[in-house]
Image (tube, rainbow, N blue to C red):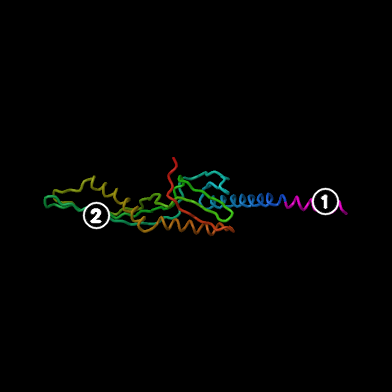
Amino acid sequence: MALIIAAVVLIIFVRLETWPARTAQRGVGELERLGKDLRAAFVDIAHLQPRITINNRVYMEQTTPASELVVLSRRIEVEHELLHTWVGSSKRVKLHGTFNVKAGFDLRQNHSIDIRPNEIIVQLPHAQILGLEQDQVDVLAFENGLWNRISGEDVQNQLSILPQLAREKATESGLPAEAEHALRQQIAQRIHTQQPLRLIFTNGQKRE
């Protein structure tokens, strides 16, 4: 009986002695499984693989299959007019342009996931206008003066101004902010964790 009691006490002592290490090991294992799930979710949502840090230790390095992630696109219409008078003779050119403007994220900038026991922090660069495609240009006015004639350079200058106006209009309308909101919603719908998940947009530097 004494030997049995001693053996039971010894087993209990060993289990208690190794309990913190076993608990910590299980905790790290859970975080690593969570890291894999988060990485898979980001591949599905954004086709990117961010750097994942668990308890300040790099668990997976960042890889980027694509350089850009387009989240939203919008049809933007702009107009611009040239009116020039010289020695009483006026010329006038007025153009209307339609563009498909794309907003999203430059994936050449740093993006990462930091998994901690009490929270998960996801960092991405701020959304921006990634590009625009000219859909259509209409000539609303094309009026020559008697001796103040419209030149090819005049037309080219006006055509080059339209994309700039479309980009500015898209930015002023809040298209990048809408792209960030849309991505936040996609992540919230796709990723479910026990810890609070914080999505932070930063002004990262482009990677060479």
Pick whichever, 92 or 25, lies toward us: 25
Residue 174 is marked as: none
Q: Residue furthest top?
A: 208
Choose mark 2 or mark 1, whichever is in front.
1
- Tell whether 204 sits left or right of 144: right
What SS does tag 1 mark? Answer: helix
What residue lies at 57% left-to-right and 56% top-to-bottom?
118
To which quarter of the image does residue 60 belong?
top right
Residue 4 location, x and y as percent?
Answer: 85, 53
Q: Residues within 10 Å of mark 1 (few under 14, many from 20)?
A: few
Q: Residue furthest left?
A: 87
Kind of residue at badge 1 = Ala
Labelled pair 2, 1 in contact (Cβ < 8 Å)? no
Residue 12 location, x and y as percent?
Answer: 77, 53
Residue 179 location, x and y as percent?
Answer: 44, 56
Kind of residue at badge 2 = Glu
What residue lies at 40% left-to-right and 57% top-to-bottom?
175
Q: How far apart are marks 2 and 1 (CA)?
A: 95 Å
Q: Does the magenta stretch include residue 7?
A: yes
Residue 7 is marked as: 1
Name the image quarter holding the C terminus. Answer: top left
Q: Which of marks 2 and 1 is nearer the N terminus?
A: 1
Q: How crowded is mark 2: few (under 14 residues within 10 Å), some or many (20 or more)?
A: some
Q: Does the magenta stretch include residue 199?
A: no
- Tell whether 164 sits left or right of 44: left
What residue lies at 48% left-to-right and 56% top-to-bottom?
183
Name the image quarter holding the N terminus. Answer: bottom right
Residue 81 is marked as: 2
Q: What stretch is highlighted in magenta?
A: 1-16
What SS does tag 2 mark? Answer: strand
What residue lies at 36% left-to-right and 59% top-to-bottom?
173
